[in-house]
Image (cartoon, rainbow, N blue to C red):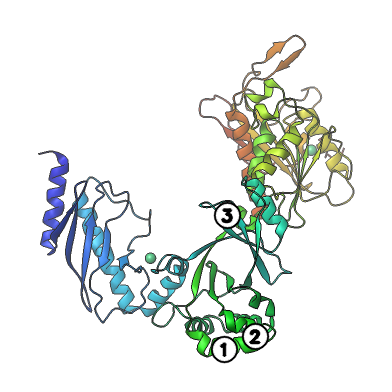
Amino acid sequence: MDTTTIRLGETLRMLSARGFITTKYVSGGGRIFEGDLHCNSGTVRVQVCLDDWDFISYPRITLISKPAFLPSLMAHVDVLNGLCYFSPGSVVLDRYDPATAVAQCLDQATTVLEKIVSDPKYCSDDFQDEFLTHWVYGQLSPPWPVVLCSTSSENAYCEYYLVGDAPERKAVIATNYADVQILATTLGCAPPKTSRCKCWLFRTERRPVLPDDAMPATIKELFFWLKKWDFALYNNIQRVLEREKEYLNAAFVTFAIDTPKGWIGFGFELDQMMRLGYRDAPKRFKQYLHRKGGLKPIFRVDITDIRADFIHSRNLVFKDLKEKRLTLVGCGAIGGYLVQALVRLGAGTGCRGELVLIDSDTIGAENLGRHYLGMTALFKSKAEALRQEIYRQFPYVRISVQTQAVRATSKFFTGDLIIDATGEEAVSEMINENHLRQKIKVPPVLYVWIKGNGECVQSLFVDSKRHGCFRCLRLPDTNRFREERFPTIRRPPQRQNFGCRSFTPYAVSAPMHAASLATDAVIDWMKGDPSPRFRTRYIEKTDAKIVKNQNISPLKECQACGSQ
Ligand SMILES: [Zn+2]
Ligand SMILES: [Zn+2]
């Protein structure tokens, strides 16, 4: 017998010992079983579908019976009575011990049901947490898909637009037509089509509550549930229905609510005769909605948020770079990768946010083997070509470009953070000297560079005289000319010479390494503590000396920041 058969046998024995019987064979070696889960309050008849012996997805457990002791609306039970007992990816089931794995699932399913019955708070808490899933997918009728492109604090509603051609056509809501135009261009679609319909915007700090018996299906049920969820929110919606007669111009009206669990949307059709009759008396129309009109069904709106706020902060547990003003000097190998990271962290977004790119150089064939940009950027200004590339990806990011050589004037030392990714020590020393000389409060400067042939990468964050400056990385002793204070590489790097020109060879991994080091330094600054200010990261195969990550002390004799 092969191992698969043995394992299947063990699983079957376990299931039959628990009273489960095979009711169906499914293609690909799967089986469906039926049996009881034993909870304290009674048994629940379930179906278990085992068709993935790799356990990439968990066995599907579906409630066949819904005994009276179970509440009518349950967390973790979808509209088809499927039970979610492990959240996807939370547990890895052991493919080498399927009997135990399946037993684990049955036990967990029993525990979840047990908790739903015995702990109403658990049930409603979890329901609130997964409300959006219940709202969008957990019901039989499909929701209306809508893309949320922009919002603004001045606008109470979004307009509807159509972008693209069927079948990929998207309904897009936005407060500003220009935003939708940019989106259409970015997606390679024709200019958006406008419509008369509106989506009114609201916000609440409260999680949506568990409805009493069932999800709201009519306007009256919707109002009832909104009242239970957040009375102020309910009132705001009533106020729109009562006062804003524009909504009566379209055949339907929709609402989008920004909740702590994501955007929740719904809407309903407006009776043609009634809305035309009351087109100047929205208050009367609202009254109608509370009477006979309230029996009409609602529809749910599935809102996909594509606003910069969502895109750049979704993966973060700290505040992104929105509203920050950043200057990046050097758009070469390091800067090219670094700017990609900065933009993903939200650089250049928000009404005040800006990213300044400074580089006087153009892209040559010699750069392409280790630069983010490719052939399309050849012979172009590095800074300008990077801006074009970022616009192609994130058209709303605000970037300005300076193609003259960097000059460390007082105008240069403005904004929130300056990053020197030139990797050229002479430039860094010039910036450092002028940085220290500024009389007014200036933004911190982050320096990042590659050592030798890429054995390690380093960064230094300079934000106060209490810590060492860029020049403090060199010994001030003139007898030991420019000797390093924290030596790393043991021999001079390999150089390659072409006539009078030479360069240090390193592969593309080195600037990527440096860019990720600098990104983490920026993230720590965003989180409020830039320590350790001096950082070194090594590649695995190097005999370079290990330098501790630390806040370096200023040297009294430092030519740049010292007191002498
Ligand atoms: Zn769940
Ligand atoms: Zn110094």
* Residue 276 image point, x, y percent: 63, 81
* Residue 140 image point, x, y percent: 38, 68
Question: Which residue is the site of mark 3?
Answer: 316
Task: Establish if 133 lies above or below 179.
Answer: below
Nearest the viewer among 340 and 180 is 180
Estimate how packed mark 1 is, as few (under 14), some (14 to 19) or many (20 or more) residues with alpha carbons within 10 Å.
Answer: some
Amino acid type, mark 2:
Tyr
Amino acid type, mark 1:
Tyr
* Residue 241 image point, x, y percent: 63, 82
On the rendered structure, is 383 left or right of 65? right
Q: Which circle's residue, 2 or 3, is located before the other in the chain? A: 2
Answer whether labels 1 and 2 touch (C-beta < 8 Å): yes
**Quadrant where the C terminus is found in the figure:** top right
Nearest the viewer among 26 and 97 is 26
Figure quadrant of residue 393: top right
The mark closer to the camera, 2 or 3, is: 2
Real-space CA distance between mark 3 and mark 1, rounded to the nearest whole angstrom: 46 Å
Amino acid type, mark 3:
Leu
Does the rendering let one see residue 541?
yes
On the rendered structure, is 94 left or right of 10? right
On the rendered structure, is 474 left or right of 393? right
Q: Give the SS element for disc 1.
A: helix
The residue positioned 66% from the left and 26% from the top of the image is 375
Question: Which residue is the site of mark 2?
Answer: 278
Real-space CA distance between mark 2 and mark 3, rounded to the nearest whole angstrom: 48 Å
Question: Which residue is the site of mark 1?
Answer: 288
The residue positioned 41% from the left and 83% from the top of the image is 212
Q: Give the SS element for disc 2.
A: loop
Q: Which circle's residue, 1 or 2, is located before the other in the chain? A: 2
The mark closer to the camera, 3 or 1, is: 1
Does the rendering let one see residue 319?
no
Figure quadrant of residue 59: bottom left
